[in-house]
Image (cartoon, grey):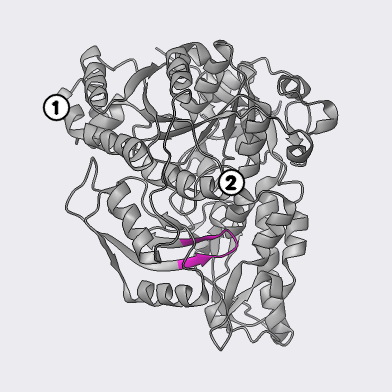
Amino acid sequence: MTFKSDIEIAQESKTLHIREIGKKLGLTEDDLEFYGKYKAKIDYNLLKTHKRDKKAKLILTTAINPTPAGEGKTTTTIGVADALQKIGKNSIVALREPSLGPVFGIKGGAAGGGYAQVVPMEDINLHFTGDMHAITSANNLLCAAIDNHIHQGNQLNIDPRTITWRRCVDMNDRQLRNIVCGMGRKVDGIVREDGFDITVASEVMAAFCLANNISDLKEKLGNIIIGYTYENLPVRAKELNANGAMAALLKDALKPNLVQTLEGTPAIVHGGPFANIAHGCNSIIATKIGMNFADYVVTEGGFGADLGAEKFLDIKCRMADIKPDAVIIVVTVRALKYNGGVDKSNLNESNLKALEAGLPNLLKHIENITKVFKLPAVVAINEFPTDTEEEINLIKEKCNELGVNVALSQVWSKGGEGGIDLAKEVVRLCEMENDFEYAYSLECTIKEKINDIATKIYGADGVDFTKEAEKEIANLEKLGYGNLPICMAKTQYSLSDDPSKLGRPSNFRITVRKINISAGAGFIVALTGDIMKMPGLPKVPAAQRIDIDENGVISGLF
């Protein structure tokens, strides 16, 4: 049996003019800035002029730890928004923007899949409205300002050896991780070690997504620490007078992008930091726009609940003063069997023993959401044709023991129609009272906050800090940054910091090897394991499958 590719399904869809999508939200043409027929930007100033009394319900979609078998979190998020429309609810989906690195690298397209997609998927996956380029430009403007300042006399007394601000590019390029720049003549700058991060790992992306408006963004950009003086005092972007120009480059990018699902449900796609190295969710402005113009907003956090959801709840919700009304935890039978030790090539075979061995991973994520954060949750099984009734029933049984219902999701094959049961459970959960709590208090020390995340969320026995990390923690607390939230940089593949430890590991400790301050974004980054801010391409990158014909029709984007 052959299936149409995602891009074929998207290209065959009947897409509405974006003004019609705006109308569904009560937006006029004057409220939108058109980027062609099917994309538009929404002015964030509407949050001031179009206030509504009715509070929207916020639904967060998360998942188990990702596996090569795939989970379908974005697909489920889109499908649920479509299903809510089908049962008569005014819904919108709020997603992250894909990054070119993963699109051309290991992931391929990242706009949902099957009959639960956002369109135009080719545009969304490629240059879209240029937001990523604007973020790259703002980041590199600050780099240029730093090196020029030193070249022109270095009035701020910056120690080039301490510069932490790196260049960035929106492409997986391992060759650029570590470079030497400024070589050549005296007029070509000072020679120093440098490197590139991928754009989505830039602090500019994090500040951009956590800003409430352009003034807030300018202030956050100004607070970015770029390095230290010879006296070991922090130097900020505002001391280089760079933040105003950086914000100017981002003025249009800060406006959320309005597109649609295959079924014409409004969709906002805006901002996209990685969840294993940053906070992993779309912009505060996008979420608030959604909550201002719809009754149900379905959004997502990157990777599993140990990363994206934790950061959404502990970082984004604090800064935006919002809280979810319900959480969807996406799982597949295949992924659980993989967690239970089955090789990727044998996942289509029924295997209750392996499924039972892999289930603790799901159960830990459920416990995190319901017991640590105290939020109501539903498990969505993203169904595959090879799933057996016995396997489905086993998952239901184990989830029910934790007081959580399970709904089958068939949105990949059926669109919104395949998510109606899930949507109904989400609506039910949204009507429940919840006692949402954070995983840690900001009043705790940096070490205490990291320990709370590691023990409560990951299930670790404790945390070990390298001497380098210890030194930086002491320095940051001395500088007055001890009250910031923590952004854990950790492998997405395991609850631990070791990607090979699948399922629900026990008797392990987390090692924090390095601490970085993201003063502009407003959090502290704790690096664990072998996490890099510039991924590489795999042996056979997705780019090798992507092509375009003489009529401009793109193929190979999944």
Q: Amino acid at mark 2?
A: Ala
- Is 19 situated left or right of 7 in this image? right
Residue 487 visible? The answer is: yes
Viewer-side residue, 1 vs 428: 428
Q: Is residue 496 visible?
A: no
Q: Residue furthest right?
A: 30
Looking at the image, residue 557 sits to the left or right of residue 38; the answer is left
Q: Identify the residue at horizontal 73%, vertical 52% (top origin).
A: 214
Residue 469 horizontal/vertical position (percent): 37, 72
Residue stretch in magenta: 516-524
Mark 1 residue type? Lys
In this view, 268 is above or below 86: below
Say above or below: 97 vs 15: below
| Identity of the residue drawn at 71% across and 19% down | 24
Q: Classify residue 365 by image quadrant.
A: top left
**Label annotation for residue 320:** 2
In this rendering, is residue 390 above or below 500?
Answer: above
